[in-house]
Image (cartoon, rainbow, N blue to C red):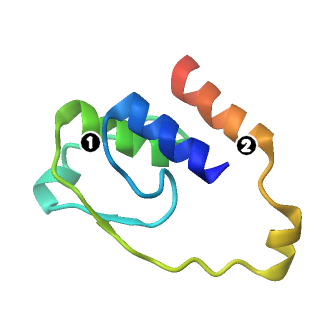
Amino acid sequence: MLKAAVKFSKLSTGLPLSDAHNGLRAFSKEVIFEINLQRDGMTHASEIVEIVSEKKLSYQEVAVEILYPKFMYKRGQSLWNSINILSDLFFK
């Protein structure tokens, strides 16, 4: 699922991100004032990438290690989460 999200993100924004929704992105103070989030929930991660691409803002990916609890590995991510995020992006 992550690989698909990375490919979709690159196709839709042109940004060569290593991870579409996780990790840390560092911005200058000036760039932060250019980002005015409008969407709720987890859609904000996609919205940030969309704004950075549209406004051609400078950004830097910062590598992070994400440590999920064991129960999260068993549960996994729901396909519905992806559908909800895409729906929020395109229809709100």
Q: Is residue 39 above or below residue 65?
A: above
* Residue reaching furthest to the left: 30
Q: Residues within 10 Å of mark 2 (few under 14, many from 20)?
A: few
Q: What residue sits 36% from the left and 36% below the top?
A: 50
Residue situated in front as seen by the camera: 43 or 62: 62
In this rendering, does residue 73 appear at all?
A: yes
Q: What residue sits 77% from the left and 81% below the top?
A: 69
Q: Please state which amino acid type lies under the numbered disc 1.
A: Val
Q: What residue does disc 1 label?
A: 52
* Residue reaching furthest to the top: 91
Q: What residue sits 37% from the left and 43% below the top?
A: 49
Rendered location of residue 67, percent (x, y): 64, 81
Task: Give the mark nearest the N terminus, 1 or 2.
Answer: 1
- Label 1 residue SS: helix
Left or right: 67, with 64 as reference point: right
Q: Count every numbered label the image shows and give the total.
A: 2
Q: Is residue 75 above or below residue 56?
A: below
Q: What residue sits 26% from the left and 42% below the top?
A: 52
- Residue 81 tag number: 2
- Residue 89 tag number: none
- Label 2 residue SS: helix
Q: What separation in Å lies between label 1 and label 2 (alpha carbons)?
A: 23 Å
Quadrant for the C terminus in the image: top right
Rendered location of residue 73, percent (x, y): 81, 71
Rendered location of residue 86, percent (x, y): 60, 30
Q: Is residue 30 above or below residue 73?
A: above
Q: Please state which amino acid type lies under the numbered disc 2.
A: Asn
Left or right: 10, with 79 as reference point: left
Residue situated in front as seen by the camera: 30 or 75: 75
Q: Residues within 10 Å of mark 1 (few under 14, many from 20)?
A: some
Left or right: 67, with 20 as reference point: right
Rendered location of residue 33, percent (x, y): 19, 49
